[in-house]
Image: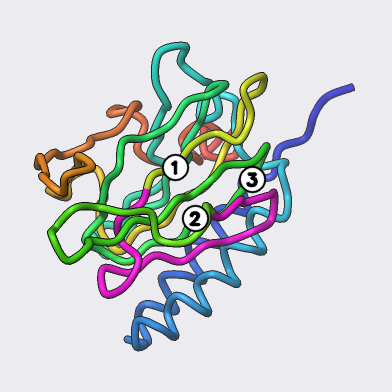
Amino acid sequence: MTHIRHPERLRAFIGALAELIDSNPREGDLLSRGGKLLGQLVRYDDWLPDEFATPDPTRYQQFLLHADSRQRFSVVSFVWGPGQSTPIHDHRVWGLIGMLRGAEYSQGFARSADGRLEQEGPAIRLEPGHVEALSPRSNDIHQVSNAFDDQVSISIHVYGANIGAVKRAVYQPDGSEKLFISGYSNAFLPNIWDLSKESQAQ
């Protein structure tokens, strides 16, 4: 039996998000309404091609699904192998995380009076269909990890810039930071529908 993919779900999400951003909403409204759109996307696990869902045994993968032509936002699939996690890091732009498959933990951090980073509350566990919002104004520093030691997890991240080109930072527990630019695991596959039969037929 052939497994049917529905890449139109991502296209619909991108169109709706672009229309929302065109209306120039306040950040809070953007995160709220954008989060609902992302929640509708990750409610279904039938649209992400295997090429964007393949884990690596040594580190998590960050696959670009769409980069807005005006650099206003990007959509990325994060693929977590068993037990994999990020360093503590920031984004410096707004973000939305939608859980597609498996589960992950997002642990927030905040600076103490002496400049060190301390865990801010308990880790948030994201299950399929759940969405978390991030903002440089409040909860921008966190660490993300696969909730499972024996299976792959996949989340869909949306950022208010081409995140693979944004200069941001990873942190040590003492609060010291190191700037980095992440890039993507698939530098030559910029949009998901390049792999769809529909686009190949056009």
Q: Classify mark 1: residues with Cα within 10 Å, few (<14), some (14-19) or many (20+).
A: many
Q: Which residue lies furthest to the top in this view?
A: 57
Indicate left or right for 189 with 162 as reference.
right
Q: Mark 2 highlights which residue?
A: 97
Q: Mark 2 or mark 1, which has the lower sequence index?
A: 2
- Was residue 136 drawn as part of the magenta stretch in this picture? yes
Q: Mark 1 highlights which residue?
A: 144
Indicate left or right for 142 with 179 as reference.
right
Query: Marks 3 and 1: in contact by CB < 8 Å?
Result: no
The span picked out in magenta is 124-142
Disc ID at residue 190: none
User: Which quadrant of the figure has residue 63?
Assistant: top left
- Was residue 12 drawn as part of the magenta stretch in this picture? no
Residue 91 drawn at (x, y percent):
26, 55
Residue 54 drawn at (x, y percent):
53, 21
Q: Which of marks 1 and 3 is in front?
A: 1
**How many numbered marks does the figure carry?**
3
Residue plotted at (30% across, 64% down): 160
Q: Mark 3 highlights which residue?
A: 100
Kind of residue at disc 3? Leu
Q: Which residue lies furthest to the front in this view?
A: 114
Specify the color scheme: rainbow
Residue plotted at (51% across, 79% down): 32
Residue 90 drawn at (x, y percent):
26, 52
